[in-house]
Amino acid sequence: MNTVQVNPKDAMTLRQRTGLGIMDCKEALAHNGSDMAKAEAWLREKLKGKMDTRTDRPAGQGCVAVCIESGRASIIEVRAETDFTAKNDQFREMSTQLAKSACEQSGEVKPTAPMTAAIDELRIKTGENISFGRGVCLHGGNFAKYVHHDGRLGVLLQFEGELPADLATGICQHVAAVVPTPLSVDESGVPADTLAQKRADAQAEAKASGKPEQIAAKMAEGKLRKFLEEVTLLGQPYVRDDKKSVKQLLPAGVRILKFVRMTVGG
């Protein structure tokens, strides 16, 4: 039986450092001769081991975080088990810092050792299965963002040229809200197999109408154009003013390069 006497002030200091229960802190100090640094390391390692056994628990909550820096931007998803933790200030602050760290990467974001350490620390404090979901980092051009008030939906927009801030944010909100969700910026980004199937369906429907071949061909192309207007960002009626398409609202010299729409668990 361990007989080391623990100073209550030391236990409280360790509790403040780690956010863990006072009994866990006393045990850590007792096992490490009241050495504060060793006790903290021992405690984190011990409880991290416990948390590693819980990674199979469903993490259906979380938030989306976006970071925009000079010439680059990231959007990430961080997962948690409960809505309570997902809305916690510490969880949101950690997610913001993870998005900032993600800006150091390019393309698909992979959690680094410091990012994983930050997640592990909060996993220990909350006792929940918190994890890095996914992320993307874009380089070049200008950026705009929108994160819904509940934190579960976010959009990152990449563009070239001078786009008024309100319109840039509005286009992000358009991507977040419009139905159907755009598949791509323009026709060039629509998956080839999707385009081929829609073209074949339109042609078959036009032929079945019994119209002359030339007219049927025009009908098919018309249906295809309508489909592309419905599923491409530039072709869609702007959500704030459906009398104009997003493309018609863009100032001269502005080109939308990419958008990333991310939802928790989506």
Image (cartoon, rainbow, N blue to C red):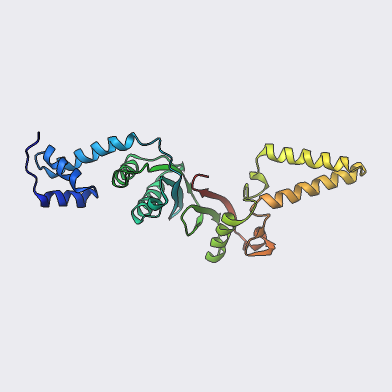
- Residue at 9% across / 45% down in the picture? 6
User: Residue 179: horizontal and vertical position, in percent?
Assistant: 64, 53
Q: Which of 118 and 87 is in front in this view?
A: 87
Q: Which of 266 and 232 is in front in this view?
A: 266
Work out whether 252 lies above or below 201: below
User: Residue 126: horizontal and vertical position, in percent?
Assistant: 32, 47
Q: Nearer the viewer, residue 30 or 109?
A: 30
- Residue at 40% across / 35% down in the picture? 56
Q: Which residue lies furthest to the front in this view?
A: 1
- Residue at 61% across / 59% down in the picture? 253
User: Residue 240: horizontal and vertical position, in percent?
Assistant: 62, 64
- Residue at 35% across / 43% down in the picture? 128
- Left or right of 190? Residue 167 is left
Is residue 171 among what the camera can see?
yes
Is residue 162 among what the camera can see?
no
- Left or right of 52? Residue 155 is right
Work out whether 51 lies above or below 157: above
- Left or right of 126? Residue 250 is right
User: Residue 52: horizontal and vertical position, in percent?
Assistant: 33, 35
Q: Give the tally of numbered discs.
A: 0
Work out whether 202 lies above or below 167: above
Which of the image's four quarters has the N terminus?
top left
